Image (cartoon, helix red, strand yellow):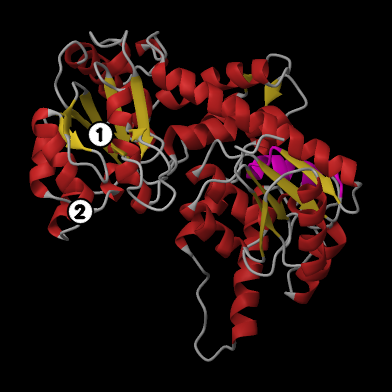
């Protein structure tokens, strides 16, 4: 066991399970930290690096199924292991969809746990190696043809990249999460005169504020507790090349001031040092925040904005790209069929219409996840609408569209009305099939029928099979 590996984070609200997992893993030489709740786990992940996260599916507050997507969104390369009390194919798919690399069913043998953790440790090492190689690679990592789409905004975007890349202009990329800001930055570097030099990427939101300055500019020995030797910063690694500062809107104002000075002439001082150093790097920055609002609220320096905003890119959200949704969906379909070793599939016309009708708040990243899910679930050679999420229901739940509630009702009656509305909507969408509705709502058909009877939903016309029925 390498002592360089960071600790494992265990999240379980049962004390005995926490003690068991710590004991088994400690015996194998792993360092382990244990927490009771998902909320505490997210806070811990903000503070330090972990080898992986092991979480129980059911926790006191936020569940493991809710925790894993948050981890995947914020720390996409962090391996996660789900522990569940039940081992069914449906729950296995749910765990993988939530972001788990692997899952274990209780009770499990220590050897099973050790094997799964070993796989995650191997994944961690591989990710670290690949990250190091790609961040220092002088080869072409990104290509312009990876920006898929034929709408006017994307055609203009590709043309602007080709025009700006050969220059040394500082670039600011503004746009919603999932619109491809990192891909744009990589393409600019790959098409630039600096492509043979290092391309270094830093996610400013993923590194604790206390460590970000050291990560950027390096530190001298003894600069702070734990600084046992001198360390070069990422700007020194990027000398002659490009540095991509993602989520720069989350950088503290004090560090913004030091970055502004660095942008002026490339000079900086390591944390705890006195010597002024100088490098030649190109800066590309990106954020999904409303940067003008942040300036007005005194959260982002106006002078830094103007210094970064030499050339501005604004990748369009997916909802404004029309038929590009289908081009991207077909691309991801081909990719995941190959990656998951599944037979080649195509999209049905009904599925394409369903994809075109969605607003895509998560943009291209959301579409990618939807297609990966469809490849996992679809058993035929054509992806059907049933294996694509119910976007209308999700949108209503996001917006909190509750049915009209008469005044004077108690909480139980209000919740019952809301539950009745949801079940009615899903029943109608599934043509009153009890089986399909129960599956979509993740309950047994007997439980669904009980709820319908309790809520005074007429179930006489609903069917157990896939034929049409009627309910009121």
Q: Visible in this render: residue 467?
A: no
Q: Main secondary structure of the magenta part?
A: helix
The range drawn in magenta is: 87-101
Query: Residue visible at 25% across and 11% down?
Result: 194
What element does badge 1 sit on? strand
Residue 257 drawn at (x, y percent): 15, 47
242 relative to 362, above or below: above
The image position of residue 198, as x and y in percent, is 34, 17
- Label 2 SS: helix
Q: Quadrant of residue 248?
A: top left
Name the N-terminal-most of marks 1 and 2: 2
Task: Report the front residue among 142 and 472.
Answer: 142
In front of the other: 459 or 379: 379
- Report the number of numbered marks: 2
State the mark number for residue 328: none
Residue 462 position within the rendered picture, expressed as x and y whole percent measured from the top left: 80, 56
**Mark 1, other Cα within 10 Å: few <14 / some 14–19 / many ≥20:** many
């Amino acid at each position: 066991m390498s002592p360089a590996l960071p600790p494992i984070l265990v999240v379980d609200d049962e004390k005995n399970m926490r003690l068991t997992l710590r004991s088994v893993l400690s015996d194998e030489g792993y360092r382990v930290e244990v927490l009771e709740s998902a909320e505490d786990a997210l806070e811990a992940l903000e503070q330090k690096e972990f080898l992986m996260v092991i979480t129980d599916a059911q926790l006191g507050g936020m569940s493991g199924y809710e925790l894993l997507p948050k981890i995947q969104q914020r720390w996409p390369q962090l391996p996660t292991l789900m522990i569940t009390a039940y081992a069914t194919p449906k729950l296995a798919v749910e765990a993988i969809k939530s972001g788990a690399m692997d899952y274990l069913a209780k009770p499990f043998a220590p050897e099973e746990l050790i094997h799964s953790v070993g796989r995650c440790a191997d994944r961690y090492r591989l990710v670290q190696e690949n990250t190091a190689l790609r961040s220092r690679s002088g080869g072409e990592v990104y290509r312009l043809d990876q920006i898929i789409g034929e709408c006017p905004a994307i055609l203009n975007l590709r043309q602007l990249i080709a025009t700006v890349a050969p220059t040394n202009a500082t670039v600011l990329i503004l746009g919603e999460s999932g619109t491809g800001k990192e891909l744009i930055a990589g393409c600019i570097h790959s098409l630039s005169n600096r492509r043979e030099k290092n391309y270094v990427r830093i996610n400013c939101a993923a590194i604790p504020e206390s460590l970000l300055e050291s990560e950027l500019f390096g530190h001298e020995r003894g600069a702070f507790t734990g600084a046992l030797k001198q360390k070069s910063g990422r700007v020194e690694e990027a000398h002659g090349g490009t540095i991509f500062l993602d989520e720069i809107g989350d950088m503290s104002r004090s560090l913004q001031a030091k970055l502004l000075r660095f942008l002026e002439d490339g000079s900086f001082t390591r944390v705890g040092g006195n010597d002024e150093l100088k490098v030649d790097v190109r800066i590309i920055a990106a954020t999904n925040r409303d940067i003008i609002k942040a300036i007005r609220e005194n959260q982002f320096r106006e002078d830094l904005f103007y210094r970064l905003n030499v050339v501005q890119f604004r990748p369009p959200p997916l909802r404004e790209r029309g038929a590009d949704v289908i081009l991207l969906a077909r691309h991801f379909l081909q990719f995941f069929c190959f990656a998951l070793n599944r037979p080649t599939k195509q999209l049905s016309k009904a599925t394409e219409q369903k994809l075109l009708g969605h607003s895509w708040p998560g943009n291209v990243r959301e579409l990618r996840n939807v297609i990966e899910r469809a490849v996992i679930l679809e058993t035929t050679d054509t992806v059907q609408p049933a294996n694509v999420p119910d976007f209308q229901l999700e949108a209503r739940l996001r917006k909190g569209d509750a049915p009209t509630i008469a005044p004077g009702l108690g909480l139980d009656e209000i919740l019952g009305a809301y539950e009745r509305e949801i079940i009615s909507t899903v029943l109608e969408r599934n043509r009153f099939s009890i089986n399909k509705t129960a599956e979509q709502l993740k309950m047994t058909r007997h439980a669904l029928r009980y709820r319908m009877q309790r809520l005074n939903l007429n179930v006489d016309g609903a069917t157990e099979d896939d034929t049409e029925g009627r309910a009121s």
